Amino acid sequence: MPYTGSMNTRRNWMVGAAAALVSMATAVALAAPARKAPAPLPPHKRPAPTPIGLTLQLKLGATDGFFDDAIAFSRDGTRFAVVHTDGQTYNRVEIFDIAAASAAGTATPPPTRTIDLSPFTQQPAELAFLADGQTLFVKERLVVDGAPQPARAQLYKPDGTVLRAYGPVTDLALTEIAGVEAVVTYKEKPGKKGISYEIVATRADNGKNIVKRALVADAEDFVKSADLRISFFSHHYLQVHGRQKGAFDKAKDMRLPDRAATYDVVAGKITASADIGDLREAQRLMLLRKNAPDVAAFVRVADDLSHVELITAADRATPVTLADDMVKYDPRSARDQLSPDQKQIYFSLTIDPVNLVAVDKKIADIEYIDLYRADAESGAATRLGRLPALGRPFGWRVSGDQWAVLRKHKGFSRGGPDLELYKVTAK
């Protein structure tokens, strides 16, 4: 039966009914036993990552300023050098005796000796010890707005005085020629009708000339004296790779296809030539080599990101087998270093914590830096060690069984505050 009373009376009735219901619910709740809150889900527990296949020998912390990117080991592996700077007011090389520094334990040991670089440069690009383990090569090549500037270098005696200076030139490198340490300078001199490539190699110990060569090319990079059209330089500018015109076949009344040729700057002549089998692959290698004129071999991630490939000194692309699936690595993380004897190449790849495999498992992987060593001819590779990246960018340098790792700044691309030296225990 519908309710026919006044609105106020009806409202009072509804309020009273609601209050009665609340009272009843409260009484029931008080009479029932108290319910426990659900226990929180257990967190995913994983121990803090530690180095694998590596033993920490030494850890240096920059109490002021930072360590720059350039790092060098002596040939015998007994000492290393690093640049300590604040980027403005001081810039010095600090040289450490590894055994003495390691014996100091966790305390930051003082360097064995220092060299003030401020009169020469505020941003060295490369450090290298000569074979005597004392003389130091320091190279500067600044990059301004993405464009490389002329290169300079100096050799420093053990007492910190300058032994010899080089440049400015287009580029330069410390290398070996027939077992003799040499500094190679490379200079491009544009002219009205083309360009002159000047390569000068001098002994590092006494400064005497080994070779001085000028290759004068026309607008199409053809060098008449070498009968070669230049494609790229390699081996620290001591080899020139290009194409020779094919010979004329009288029987067929036609010119044969161009041949690939290698010109040896020291010998002053073409030392190798061969038919070009795969034009597309030859063009690909040429473009890669143009970006790596100062090394004989290097590794890179293939264009399709499926694997790592080694580009050998003979310009052969060889796939490298990894200890983990390539899909787990960040393809942008590849870094490499050729050994002084050019027989081995070291490279690193960093695990991407949210790679496809980790996403499928719904558990992030540990961000390890994996260090590999590969044969520079066959590409046969071994993973030497794994180091937690700790969410920071890094740089590194290898000498034999020693791996120096620079923990870089997160928001500043140059240098970092911490340097760690590890001994590789894997064989």
Image (cartoon, rainbow, N blue to C red):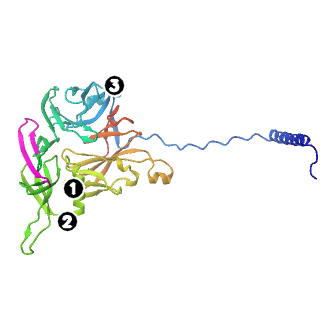
Of the pair 378 and 272, the residue shown nearer to us: 272
Q: Amino acid at mark 3?
A: Asp
Give the amino acid type for the residue marked by disc 1 in the picture. Met
**Mark 2: which amino acid?**
Gly
Q: Residue furthest bottom?
A: 251
Which residue position holds label 2? 277
On the image, numbered disc 3 is attached to which residue? 64
Residue 319 in percent (x, y) is at 29, 57
For disc 1, the neighbor class at 10 Å (few under 14, some 14 to 19, many from 20) is some
Task: Choose between 227 and 131: the one closer to the eye.
Answer: 227
Q: Is residue 367 left or right of residue 130?
A: right
Tell me which label, 3 or 1, sits earlier in the chain: 3
- Quarter of the rendering containing residue 7: top right
> What segment is highlighted magenta in the picture?
198-221
User: How far is mark 3 from mark 1, CA to CA?
Assistant: 44 Å
Which residue is at a point 21% across and 51% down the rendered structure image?
290
293 versus 112 height, above or below: below
Q: Secondary structure at mark 1?
A: helix
The answer to if 282 sits in the magenta stretch is: no
**Is the residue marked by circle 3 packed among few (<14), some (14-19), or many (20+) residues within 10 Å?**
few
Residue 56 image position (x, y, % from top left): 34, 36
